Image (cartoon, rainbow, N blue to C red):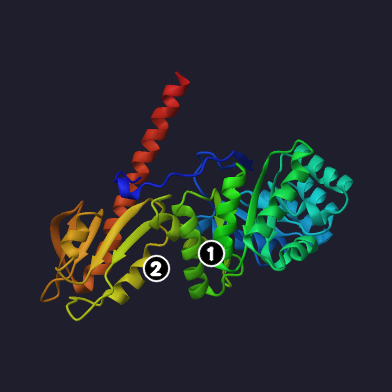
Amino acid sequence: MSYRPYQQITRRKSRQIRVGKVLVGGDAPISVQTMTNTLTSDAAATIAQIRKSEVAGVDIVRVSCPDEESTAALAEIVREVNVPIVADIHFHYRRAIEAAQAGAACLRINPGNIGSAERVKEVIKAARDHGCSIRIGVNAGSLEKHLLEKYGEPNPEALVESALWHADHLLQNDFHEFKISVKASDVFMAVAAYTQLAEACDHPLHIGITEAGGKRAGTVKSAIGLGNLLWAGIGDTMRVSLSAEPEEEVSVAWDILKSLHLRHRGVKIISCPSCARQGFDVIRTVEKLEERLAHVTQPISLSIIGCVVNGPGEALMTDIGLTGGGAGRHMVYSAGKQDHTTDTDAMINHLVGLVEARAAALDAEARAKKEAEAKVAAE
């Protein structure tokens, strides 16, 4: 949590819905999503991929359901994983009904391409009967023909009009458990569309920059677009769309959220870019620490600075710090204060041990607090 005025973000007030066990909107934490790229009909492969994303910290996972084989596998997938599953549906309204029956927590649809008003009603009934929420997914690459004719090209106004038009399909059937996305691959268009939509309604928003690109370029585009929206308080759940494995999307999403102090999970490493003053190989050290500490879920800050120019100052603001020194000896800080030294050869193992010990202590504190609360509740 941030206490400095310049670090405060005032989130847009939105309705709250439920995606399985995950609350979306209102005062709920911004949830992290990804999507599998395995054939959903291959339940074992899809389950394995979801589990990798769970380790990375995903909250919600979407799977494609283009055919009956996919929805048939959904029941096993839902049963074997620990996060809510969103079924991605296009055109075939029966797939949406089958997905709801199989235990999907949410249906991702465009009501306008499901078919007749009667078919939309059937999908809504299935969602209501089985406790599903719905995501209206609008994309700049698949806008309705009448909107393209009206506006001449995809633009923010067309995306918002499409979203509100689809939302009206659900509202006419007194269904309110839905969220909306208006994605575009162009950062300017996506940000403008979400900003306009945020002002036009109070539905929870799923934010993303669609088809952002590969791991590096897509991360940059997503950080610019999603960071802009989140900083403005817009967004209740998010996906970073990369041409990369799903767990990579999850890791990038967490880094964006941690950078804005919106959620805290795992080790946050503050490190210098390195220069000729460095007392050890900063780049290689950080690479190894990121790999060795990827399993830690408790929020812990770690500063790795190559020399004494900025090292002591950064260490003041982190849980554990290391500043490079001369003759292969480096200063270790604890809670901002000088504590002891370590040498280059032992440095990485030593820091990993310190972080793991702190994580274990925080885990023990959390368990004790939970037990105390349970005891009070039972009395």
Q: Disc 1 marks which residue?
A: 249
Q: Nearer the viewer, residue 88 or 226?
A: 226
Q: Nearer the viewer, residue 84 or 232?
A: 232
Q: Is residue 280 above or below residue 137?
A: below
**Residue at 17% over, 75% down:** 279
Q: Earlier in the sequence, mark 1 or mark 2?
A: 1
Answer yes or no: is residue 39 visible.
no
In the rendering, at what x and y percent does residue 298 appear? 38, 50
**Residue at 88% over, 50% down:** 116
Residue 139 found in image quarter: bottom right
Q: Disc 2 marks which residue?
A: 291
Marks 1/2 in contact by CB < 8 Å: the verdict is no
In the rendering, at what x and y percent does residue 160 appear? 66, 54
Q: Is residue 197 above or below residue 352?
A: above
Element marked by disc 1: helix
Q: Residues within 10 Å of mark 2 (few under 14, many from 20)?
A: few
* Amino acid type at mark 1: Glu
Q: Is residue 200 above or below residue 276?
A: above
Q: Is residue 245 left or right of residue 39?
A: left
Residue 283 found in image quarter: bottom left
